[in-house]
Image: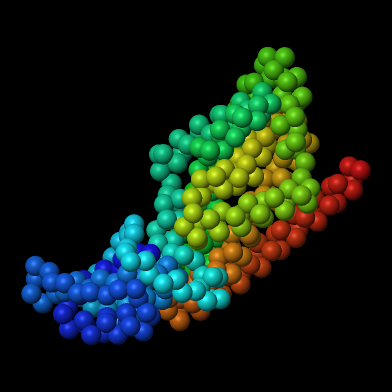
């Protein structure tokens, strides 16, 4: 639970009290501010009710000059409130749309820290792939920041937010592009040592990412769904982020390494694996957001979001089907 604090003109107190009663908040109280004509109204709200309360508050006072709505953390409240839950509550996200947006927007931020983490994680992943060291590869996944832009891309298309979508797309392309180019350079430099060159081709971790099957697509779908479930229920996404990063960074590094080393056919297989994984993660993430009922607040925004969701769904769905057809055809050719 969290505290929703509203600072507004005193004349809106009865309206806020009505909203609190309508949505059965746990507690409600009023306080004064340093300004005589403004009050502070606070209410303790259950996670499943937070979104509807915030929407009602924004509709009631969103256009009021000087009004402000704050969402504050609440560690514990005593006595413990009686738990109430219905079917709709179980399907909804535990946080509000605004809280999700704030958290996801951070992951789509393209700054120096993001670029540095991509650079370092690619180097670590490349070493792990070449040396056939699983522990090193997992270490690279822990610091890889690629989950954020992918989730933001799915989230923004669900809300119809073109600005966030553009930022997320640019961050994802930049991150994967830097990882690929750096891997190509390492692939060119590494085989200068003949022994290393033989090890490069013999690495099981490297070769395992030069082919893709239906099991790989299922893994990427499960990873994307698990990431959004963790995020929407307020759980830590760190470990799930590692799982998603496994589907993104190693195939990117493998593609660049093999292309730089001159193994074009193997590089093509790794590139196909990367494409399937990216599309599967986005499709799974978008599906979970829709099931969880993430949507804009106003009717107009919802109308725009429906159109965005429909177009994005058709695009990613068609792309996934096309990639799976290519995967199946490739397996039959190699059989």
Relative to the observer, which residue lies in front, 85 or 66? Answer: 85
Residue plotted at (90% across, 48% down): 332
In the displayed structure image, the side of residue 151 where residue 269 appears, left or right = right
Residue at 49% x, 66% y: name it: 93
| Protein image colouring | rainbow
Q: From what the image shows, is residue 165 above or below residue 49? A: above
Is 37 placed above or below 249 here? below
Q: How many marks?
A: 0
For the residue pair 62 and 252, the one nearer the viewer reads as 62
Q: Nearer the viewer, residue 52 or 210?
A: 52
In the rendered image, the quadrant that contains the C terminus is top right
- 46 vs 41, left or right, is right
Farthest residue to the front: give it.
Answer: 79
Name which residue lies at 42% across and 56% down.
Answer: 103
Residue 259 in percent (x, y) is at: 69, 32
Farthest right residue? 335
Question: In the image, is 315 to the left or to the right of 36?
Answer: right
Residue drawn at x 50%, y 61% as measured from the top left: 232
The image quarter in which residue 41 lies:
bottom left
> In the image, residue 184 lies at what x, y percent?
62, 31
Residue 290: x %, y % from top left: 57, 69
- Using the image, determine if residue 278 lies above or below residue 8: above
């Amino acid at each position: 639970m969290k505290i929703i604090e509203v600072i507004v003109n005193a004349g809106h107190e009865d309206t806020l009290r009505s909203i609190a009663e309508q949505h059965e908040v746990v507690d409600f109280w009023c306080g004064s501010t340093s300004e005589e004509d403004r009050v502070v109204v606070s209410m303790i709200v259950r996670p499943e009710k937070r979104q509807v309360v915030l929407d009602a508050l924004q509709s009631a006072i969103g256009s009021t000059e000087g009004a402000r709505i704050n969402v504050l953390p609440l560690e514990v409240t005593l006595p413990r409130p009686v738990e109430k839950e219905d079917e709709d509550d179980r399907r909804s996200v535990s946080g509000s749309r605004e809280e999700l947006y704030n958290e996801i927007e951070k992951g789509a931020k393209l700054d120096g820290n993001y670029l540095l983490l991509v650079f370092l994680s690619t180097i670590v992943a490349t070493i792990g792939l070449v040396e056939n060291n699983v522990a090193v590869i997992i270490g690279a996944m822990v610091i890889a920041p690629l989950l954020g832009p992918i989730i933001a891309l799915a989230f923004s298309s669900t809300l119809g937010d073109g600005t966030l979508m553009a930022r997320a797309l640019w961050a994802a392309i930049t991150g994967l592009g830097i990882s690929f180019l750096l891997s190509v350079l390492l692939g060119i430099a590494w085989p200068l040592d003949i022994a290393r060159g033989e090890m490069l081709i013999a690495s099981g971790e490297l070769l395992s990412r030069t082919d893709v099957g239906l099991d790989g697509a299922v893994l990427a779908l499960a990873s994307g769904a698990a990431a959004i479930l963790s995020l929407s229920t307020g759980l830590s996404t760190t470990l799930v982020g590692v799982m998603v990063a496994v589907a993104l960074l190693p195939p990117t590094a493998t593609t660049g390494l093999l292309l730089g080393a001159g193994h074009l056919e193997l590089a093509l297989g790794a590139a196909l694996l990367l494409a399937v994984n990216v599309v599967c993660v986005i499709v799974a993430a978008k599906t979970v957001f829709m099931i969880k009922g993430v949507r804009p607040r106003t009717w107009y925004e919802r109308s725009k979001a429906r159109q965005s969701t429909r177009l994005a769904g058709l695009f990613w769905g068609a792309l996934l089907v096309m990639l799976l057809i290519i995967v199946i055809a490739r397996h039959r050719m190699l059989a």
